[in-house]
């Protein structure tokens, strides 16, 4: 599904990623853990296609290099990033935005546009699963949403857009335990053999609920250790400094 | 070149003059205009809109329009029920007040005697004083609330190439009455022309007046309008400006809050593109205590467009408990676009609440990125943000059908379809 080959990235003359390698097969869930500032969000941004980075190495998605694929086409091809800090977009109605987004992606997949009724039914169903108050969906996108609502809204978008490669950037941060469980349920129910997840987190807590197949430790822009889900437990006990 | 843009005094003889006084007044004004010429950036009020320069770049010649327009076929707005007034090239053609009690409404075409003869330093007002012979005069009797909105179809015909049109309008809403108008400009001229309007609005005690100004589409027109409003106690003046797609447009708005508890609001959502140049200049005079004014101007600028907001709030010494607010926000899409803002406060009373602010910035790249990760192209994402930015103003329109109508017109400007 995804192959990252010797990825080096810098921004504003600052090296952030220093030769990162990672391979994710279809159906797998990988967790990346690392201290603040280790480059987790940078990796997520680069996968989404954000510009501004100087990059060497390669990214392959379903066997195809992502190098010249712009942001929106990555999304259309099934790459989804749940943002660590979802942006507030004033004046843009959440439901309208979700519908526009879904229809552009459906169009790219060669599917018919969804009509309003079918869309509203779909949103209602997914929102209920995630315990999202439907009222917030008629509000402006993320504007005045609580931290938890913003994160849930990211997972709602994931559910609606139905992507193949899902990157969750610290989706757990700032959530209370109930919200964390709902979100984890939302993710777990999406797991399938044609979907892969890259779960980025600072704490092991989330991994109690979303069981990863592999855990990687990111430090100074490199994966310094990989292992099974036990590694996350070990990290939590010893702290990042002692690993290596 | 138009730099020595002068108009022959003989043009005045082509007007139906009412008497010698009228003639003398017009001659005096035209002489003043010929001597002063079009305003330039040296005039404080035209600091950011050098009309002489704009004209010399865009007009090879300019003639006074003397032709009387034929009644033109035009399409009525179907989105909502409305009364209407039809103007062609500023000339009052006819009206239809089918939803109203006609005894309460007086409408006539322009009459010179409806306007006081004042000397102005503004050369465009002088030009208007000298040459105006078209327009309308609308009066609403007291205690009458309009059932439906009144649309003023402001049509410009095909044969206006390099013409200048001067007109004067007057709207009076008497005590306890209510009027809501939509000024809808429809342009058929393929070539440039200049429309110079002087408008008077008088609101009696406890009267309510709301105006939405908007265009049907892009236009080759250059517009200047001076609006002279005077509003009495407990009355409410509300103006929404959505004009987009005009080559040049300056709305010079002066509102005198003359009666206690009167309220004035000016809200605008502008999308400027290409070489569009638009200025909103306001002067709100708080002349008595306990009045409130509110101004919010949101502008989006693309390509080489230029936007200007000059907003002044004046508070007279006796105007205690004044509450005045003014905010301008601009979103610059292109590096070549420009926005100038000059908010001004002149306050002589001590117990007042006045605030003003102005921001301008680029579209937020992170927001664009966020939307693009959901499959939208950069253009779609930008358009969504622009719409979102302007929406705040549109959302203040109370009627859903009119809101939808305005939204469609603005989206047409933003999306180009
Ligand atoms: N635009 C930028 N310019 C300079 N430094 C940056 C920029 N973005 C991120 N960094 C730096 O790169 C490092 C990694 O950041 P980030 O990927 O956000 O870390 P994490 O998500 O792991 O906390 C940090 O030290 C951060 O300060
Ligand atoms: Mg981060």
Image: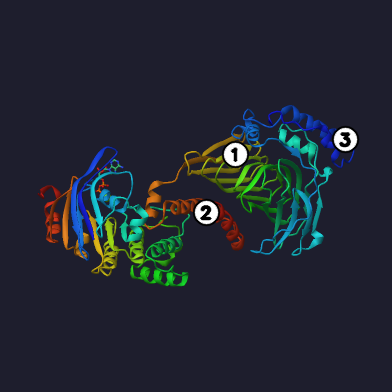
Please identify, in this view, whether the residue under mark 1 or under mark 3 is nearer the observer: 3
Q: Which is more toward the observer, B21 or B300?
A: B300
Label 3 secondary element: helix
Please identify, in this view, whether the residue under mark 3 or under mark 2 is nearer the observer: 2
For the residues labelled 1 and 2, the Cα–Cα distance comes to: 29 Å
Please report the residue visible at 28 percent of the width from the left and 60 percent of the height from the top.
A166
Q: Is residue A45 left or right of residue B65?
A: left
Q: Is residue A226 left or right of residue B281?
A: left
Please identify, in this view, whether the residue under mark 1 or under mark 2 is nearer the observer: 2
Q: Which residue is mark 3?
A: B21
How crowded is the residue under tag 1: few (<14 C-alpha within 10 Å), some, or many (20+)? many
Query: Are the two marked residues, 1 and 3, in contact with CB atoms closer than 8 angstroms?
Result: no
Horizontal and vertical percent for residue B299?
54, 45
Q: Which residue is mark 1?
A: B311
Q: Which residue is mark 2?
A: B415
For the residues labelled 3 and 2, the Cα–Cα distance comes to: 52 Å
Horizontal and vertical percent for residue A148?
33, 59
In the image, is the residue at mark 1 within 8 Å of ligand 1 by its beta carbon?
no
In the image, is the residue at mark 2 within 8 Å of ligand 1 by its beta carbon?
no
Horizontal and vertical percent for residue B357?
52, 40
Q: Judge whether residue A64 can be spotted in this image.
A: yes
Label 2 secondary element: helix
The C terminus of chain B sits in image quarter: bottom right
How crowded is the residue under tag 3: few (<14 C-alpha within 10 Å), some, or many (20+)? few
Q: Which is more toward the observer, B404 or B114?
A: B404
Label 1 secondary element: strand
């Amino acid at each position: 599904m995804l192959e990252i080959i010797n990825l080096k990235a810098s921004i504003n003359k600052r090296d952030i990623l220093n030769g990162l390698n990672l391979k994710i097969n279809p159906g797998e869930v990988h967790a990346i853990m690392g201290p603040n500032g280790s480059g987790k969000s940078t990796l997520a941004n680069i996968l989404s296609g954000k510009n501004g980075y100087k990059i060497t190495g390669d990214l392959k998605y379903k066997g195809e290099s992502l190098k010249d694929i712009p942001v929106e086409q990555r999304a259309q091809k099934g790459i989804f990033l749940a943002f660590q800090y979802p942006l507030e977009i004033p004046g843009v109605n959440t439901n309208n935005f979700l519908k526009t987004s879904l229809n552009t992606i459906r169009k790219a997949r060669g599917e018919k546009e969804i009509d309003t009724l079918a869309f509203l039914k779909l949103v209602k169903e997914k929102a209920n699963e995630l315990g999202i108050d439907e009222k917030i969906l008629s509000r402006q996108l993320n504007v005045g949403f609580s931290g938890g609502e913003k994160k849930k809204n990211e997972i709602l978008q994931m559910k609606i857009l139905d992507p193949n490669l899902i990157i969750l950037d610290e989706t757990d941060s700032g959530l209370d335990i109930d919200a964390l469980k709902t979100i984890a349920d939302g993710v777990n129910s999406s797991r399938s053999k044609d979907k892969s997840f890259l779960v980025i987190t600072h704490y092991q807590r989330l991994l109690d609920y979303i069981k990863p197949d592999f855990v990687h430790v990111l430090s100074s822009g490199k994966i310094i250790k990989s292992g099974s889900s036990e590694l996350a437990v070990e990290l939590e006990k010893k702290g990042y400094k002692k690993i290596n | 070149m138009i730099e020595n843009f002068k108009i022959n005094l003989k043009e005045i003889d082509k007007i139906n003059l009412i008497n010698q006084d009228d003639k003398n007044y017009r001659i005096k004004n035209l002489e003043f205009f010929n001597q002063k010429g079009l305003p330039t950036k040296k005039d404080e009020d035209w600091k950011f809109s050098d009309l002489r320069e704009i004209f010399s770049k865009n007009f090879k010649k300019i003639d006074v329009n003397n032709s009387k327009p034929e009644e033109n076929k035009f399409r009525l707005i179907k989105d909502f029920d409305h009364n209407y007034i039809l103007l062609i090239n500023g000339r009052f053609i006819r009206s239809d007040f089918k939803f109203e009690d006609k005894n309460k409404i007086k409408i006539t075409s322009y009459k010179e005697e409806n306007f006081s003869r004042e000397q102005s330093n503004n050369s465009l007002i002088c030009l208007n004083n000298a040459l105006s012979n078209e327009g309308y005069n609308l009066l609403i009797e007291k205690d009458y609330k309009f059932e439906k909105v009144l649309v003023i179809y402001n049509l410009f015909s095909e044969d206006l190439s390099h013409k200048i049109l001067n007109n004067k309008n007057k709207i009076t809403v008497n005590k306890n009455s209510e009027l809501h108008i939509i000024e809808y400009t429809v342009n058929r001229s393929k070539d440039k022309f200049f429309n110079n309007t002087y408008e008077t609005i008088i609101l009696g005690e406890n009267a309510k007046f709301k105006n939405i100004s908007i265009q049907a589409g892009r236009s080759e027109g250059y517009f200047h309008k001076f609006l002279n409003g005077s509003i009495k106690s407990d009355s409410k003046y509300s103006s929404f400006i959505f004009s987009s797609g005009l080559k040049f447009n300056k709305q010079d708005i002066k509102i005198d809050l003359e009666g206690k508890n009167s309220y004035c609001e000016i809200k605008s959502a502008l999308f400027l593109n290409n070489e569009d140049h638009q200025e909103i200049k306001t002067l709100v005079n708080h002349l008595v205590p306990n009045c409130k004014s509110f101004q919010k101007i949101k502008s989006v600028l693309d390509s080489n467009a230029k936007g200007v907001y000059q907003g002044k709030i004046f508070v007279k010494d006796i105007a205690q408990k004044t509450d005045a607010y003014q905010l301008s926000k601009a979103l610059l899409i292109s590096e070549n676009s420009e926005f100038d803002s000059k908010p001004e406060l002149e306050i002589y009373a001590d117990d007042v609440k006045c605030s003003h602010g102005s921001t301008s910035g680029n579209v937020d790249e992170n927001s664009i990125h966020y939307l693009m990760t959901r499959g939208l192209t950069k253009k779609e994402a930008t358009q969504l943000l622009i719409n979102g930015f302007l929406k705040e103003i549109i959302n203040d329109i109370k009627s859903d059908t009119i809101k939808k109508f305005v939204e469609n017109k603005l989206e047409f400007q933003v999306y180009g379809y």
